[in-house]
Image (cartoon, rainbow, N blue to C red):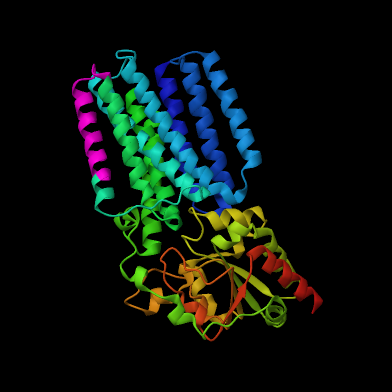
Amino acid sequence: MNANLINSAYLLAAVLFILGLKGLTSPRTAVRGNFLGALGMLLAVVATLVDRQIVSYELIVLGVAIGTVIGAIWAIKVQMTAMPQLVAAFNGFGGGASALVAGAAAMMPGAITGVPEIQVYVSSALSALIGSATLSGSLVAWAKLQGVLHWQPRGALLRFVSGGSVSAAIVFGTYYAIEPEAVWVFGALCAAALVYGLFLTVAVGGADMPVIIALLNSCSGLAAAATGFVLGNSVLIISGSLVGASGFILTQIMCKAMNRSLWDVLRGDLGEAAASASKEDLYTGRVKSTSPEEAALLFETARIVTIVPGYGMAVAQAQHAVRDLANLLESRGTEVRYAIHPVAGRMPGHMNVLLAEADVPYDRLYDMDTANPTFAETDVAIILGANDVVNPAARDEPGSPIFGMPILDVDKSQVVVVVKRSLSPGFAGIPNMLFTRDNTLMLFADAKKALQDLNREIRDI
């Protein structure tokens, strides 16, 4: 097929990708954004297949069949609450695929035509470095989110191994670009990058994973862009660059929402004060607990109720119970809102996805900037497993490790009901000042069971 026609199809696909990303910026247009992005990918795939610069249709059909079976199994078995782990794994597979393509180019020098050799070699080295690091880093992120890895090393040894491995990867990559016949150097580059990705991510705390997932997503896009330069494929360069840029912007937004630098997140650094804080000194005699029976009375006369979902809701799979509570309250004339913090949960948009699964209307979801001015008029705020994102210490205590972190101002509500299994701290490892406020009541229970009991008590009133 005419090269100009193929390139025009790629250009149209790139435009659809951009429009798709634009659509994903709002829940109202997210479905359309997904459709446009998928249409762009379909167009890019069809153009590539028609161009016939491929291995063979048979191998492609085999790959599609294998991928379809794996995808279908995961779609059925993976729960919505495990989406962060799945996203982390997908990021890793994207990086790994890019590294494999670079490896194929390294094993078959001269097989790629129409692309300057120096571009192939340099791009292969970059694709291998970024892709391999993304693969191992994403697998570590998956293991931490899945709860199968609890190792979080820190200190000089970690920095030495991490810095040494990335330095070695850069040296091997440079050497390979100069001497591409030395295939063993390419293997050493991949090995060093794998080690770097592992130690880069292993120091990160589990609750910092929204930032890391966004960063790894960015890296998978950059690896794909580098692979596009290897193959001389413009649509891969454009789409990879879009993913890389948007992922990095999202990473910066996540860091800003936590008032921490990306460097501190990667080091697992929460400040010295986190280790010395004692919840026993603060909580003794100042925490008031309640029961579902007592809490139900608060909702009987409430005009406005704000629900603040956190990771506790995700772990308990309580999103449908949340919707049941909202339906019950709305049937009695109560206005129900949802306040969403940018880093609530384990990945960007985690709470939004779970609430969407429970058919919560988009217009009831308030972001932090919209929700904060409304707490002063809220009669009851109910918090489901959120911790540091509602801790007033971030606003009121200059010496706190999280001071300056933007939070949801739930303490300004008339009454705050905190649903948690215990008084355990959040990722910062510090006491939550909210638990000691005069207008706060603690309902110690699993979020799903607490909401079910609360629903039953409200109906009986």
Q: Is residue 141 above or below residue 179?
A: below
Q: Residue at x 23, y 29 (%)?
A: 172
Q: Is residue 354 above or below residue 289?
A: above
Give x and y (percent) for residue 447: 63, 65
SS majority, magenta: helix
- Camera-side residue of 221 and 279: 279
Is any part of residue 401 visible from this angle? no
Q: Is residue 220 left or right of residue 167?
A: right
Q: Residue at x 39, y 42 (%)?
A: 137
Give x and y (percent) for residue 139: 45, 41
The answer to which quarter of the image holds residue 170 is top left
Give x and y (percent) for residue 354: 60, 55
Does the magenta run of residues contain 167?
yes
Q: Residue at x 39, y 25 (%)?
A: 100
Q: Is residue 75 left or right of residue 24?
A: right
- Camera-side residue of 360 and 67: 67
The answer to which quarter of the image holds residue 238 is top left
Q: Range of the magenta residues?
A: 161-183
Q: Quadrant of the C terminus?
A: bottom right
Give x and y (percent) for residue 375: 54, 77
The answer to which quarter of the image holds residue 10 is top left
| Total numbered labels placed on residues in the image | 0
Q: Residue at x 45, y 68 (%)?
A: 388
Is any part of residue 73 visible from this angle? yes
Q: Residue furthest right?
A: 460
- Camera-side residue of 228 and 14: 228
Q: Is residue 54 above or below residue 340?
A: above
Does the magenta run of residues contain 282?
no
